[in-house]
Image (cartoon, grey):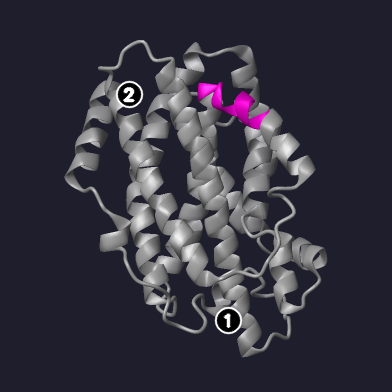
Amino acid sequence: MISNAVRVERLNRASLRRVIEPDVEVAGEPTQEQIVPDELLSVAGLDLELGPEQRARLAREELASIFHNGIMFEAVLMAGFAYQMALGADITDPRFTYALHEIGEETRHSRLFVRLFRQLAPEQRNPFIGGRWATRLYRLALPKLIKRPATLDAFVLAGEEVPDLLQKRLAEHPETDPYIAAVSRYHRAEEARHLAFARTTLGEHYAATTWSDRFAVRWIVPVAVVVMFDLMIQPYVYETVGLPPWRTWRAVRRQRAELRRECARAVLKALTDAGVVRPGAAPPLWRRVT
């Protein structure tokens, strides 16, 4: 059987073979008026009367919300890796080296997302970012997250599986703006290694961690998966095209319930494969969200 150390060494070599500088190799900008086709908009199937200009604006606003959330998530991920590295006893461990690779890749992703966010020129307001109560919540929750290695691994799986599924649909649809499709393919290729690393280390961390870390993986992460999916496109995106934000968001949430469950099932499978959850014996909250 291949050891985890060997698996991580392979990921290190894969990251060395292909270092992509997005400002050079993924340069460009969207060129289509509507960058996401109608059937991939979050409101598809809701029978809303939106004109061409509204659909084009909504496509940009939705994608901007997704990229903004991606930037924030990757900042948390990098903070978690840096915290673990600062406490690491063995800097020659291949896991230490891979964490450096992943931080480097995430910084490049984030720079690309920031550039694309500016190009999309969104008009939305986000009540979950920058407000007094949101900031207090983040300051309370984030230190607890990054100090719990198994929980961080599970969050990595959740935070990568959700956008990966959305970007897969974007990359494969023939009517997606060519540049958006290229960005999606680039990001998915590198995130595949990140998912593999999280799946490799999750079992190790879970076996050696504290009861509170295990509790969070089993009872808090499933709730977080749902929240992350539902807020990937935040409610005030819809206000930019004249739709009632919260009522539309709730309708979208009901409409996309199966897609959300598909993401949750992918995370649960990774937990099961890592030995964190026994097959057929998932905790109640995991069963509910899948």
Which numbered dot is residue 96? 2
Give the x, y percent position of residue 125: 71, 62
Q: Which residue does the numbered mark 1 point to in the structure image?
A: 56
Q: Magenta residues?
A: 141-149
Q: Nearer the viewer, residue 196 or 141?
A: 141
Disc number at residue 39? none
* Residue 180 x %, y %: 42, 69
* Residue 41 visible in the displayed image: no
Whether the magenta-drawn stretch holds residue 4 is answered as no
- Quick check: 278 left or right of 6? right
Label 1 to label 2: alpha-carbon separation = 44 Å
First along the sequence among labels 1 and 2 = 1
Q: Secondary structure at mark 2?
A: helix
The residue at the point 41 percent across, 32 percent down is: 199
Q: Taking 159 as reference, is 235 above or below it?
A: below
Query: Residue 259: x, y in percent?
Result: 59, 57
Q: Amino acid at mark 1?
A: Ala
Q: Is residue 246 above or below residue 265?
A: below
Residue that appears at 52% across and 81% down: 34
Query: What residue is drawn where x is 39% and y is 15%?
Result: 88
Q: Quadrant of the N terminus?
A: top left
Q: Nearer the viewer, residue 22 or 98?
A: 22
In-image side of 161 versus 5 (left or right): right
